[in-house]
Amino acid sequence: MALLRKFFNQTRKPEGFLGRLMLSGMNSGHAKLADWGFAHLPALSVSAAVDLGCGGGRNAGELLKKYPAAHVTAIDYSPLCVEKAKAYNRDMIAAGRCKVRQGDVSDLQLPESAFDLATAFETVYFWPGLEKCFGQAAKVLKPGGTFLICNESDGTDPTSARFEKIIDGMKNYTPQEIEAALKTAGFSQVEIDHHPTKPWIAVLARK
């Protein structure tokens, strides 16, 4: 049980051998959820996008494919995730279309009003204070910019409640809590969709 707990705690900040094991399945394990989330994006003109909490880098790669004229910046707190995301997107990095860097979403060292789109997949559970972190996302978005949040949990499902007890620092949020935090952070429009058969939620916020 202790080893299992240590393994699941790698979800928050993968590191070491167990972190590598976790990352080995992260891109494929979250692909269906991420693709469902991507489907909620309206037609956008995107020249610059940022993926916050990029994990293994798959979603940054999908942004690069979805917006072929865009430059994508991928940020993660874990150096191991940065390493994995760089390897996953090595060709686009070489082409000058992608940058992967370590960073803290509560203090993004990124230029203000620089991005048309920000995304956060399966990551806000671990952010240190939604209002502060959402405020950072708002700061780096251009006026009228879009922020997509996609979670596997709606904050009420029993499975995620069990993981919340196992994973240090994890906090599940309801759609209502996310919406309130986004509006406090300066987002004027918030739309939320709940998957018809799963506890997945997709949140679209506009600055």
Image (spheres, rainbow, N blue to C red):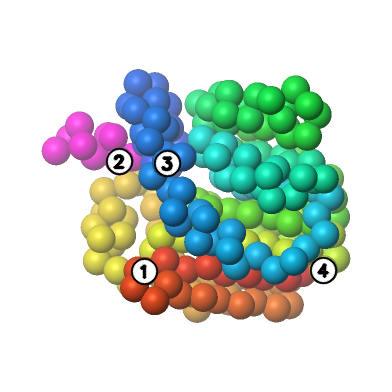
Q: Is residue 109 above or below residue 84?
A: below
Q: Which segment is the magenta one?
A: 1-9
- Image: 58 above or below 80: below
Give the residue at x 70% y 43%.
64
Q: Could you say which quadrant of the image residue 90 lies in?
A: top right
The answer to which of marks 4 and 1 sits earlier in the sequence is 4
Give the distance between the C-alpha atoms of the residues marked 2 and 4, in whole angstroms.
Answer: 37 Å
Is label 2 in a helix, a strand or a loop? helix
The answer to whether marks 4 and 3 mark residues whose Cβ atoms lie closer than 8 Å is no
Tell me if label 1 and label 2 are in contact, CB under 8 Å: no
Disc nearer the start of the sequence (4/3): 3
Residue that carries the numbered disc 1 in the rendered image: 199
Check disc 1 and give the amino acid type: Pro
Residue 93 painted magenta: no
Which residue occupies 68% across, 44% down?
65
Question: Residue 150: x percent and y percent?
Answer: 52, 60
Which comes before the other along the chain, label 2 or label 4? 2
Residue drawn at point x = 32 percent, y = 47 percent: 167
Mark 2 → mark 3, Cα distance in angstroms? 17 Å
What residue does disc 3 label? 28
Residue type (three-letter) at the residue carrying disc 2? Phe
Can you identify the residue that label 4 sits on? 144
Q: 129 left or right of 112?
A: left
Q: Is residue 9 visible?
A: yes
**Which mark lies nearer to you, 2 or 4?**
4
Secondary structure type for disc 4 = strand
Q: Is residue 141 above or below residue 196?
A: above
Q: How far apart are marks 4 and 3 (CA)?
A: 32 Å
Helix, strand or loop status at disc 1: loop
- Kindly identify which residue carries mark 2: 8
Q: Which amino acid does label 4 sit on?
A: Gly
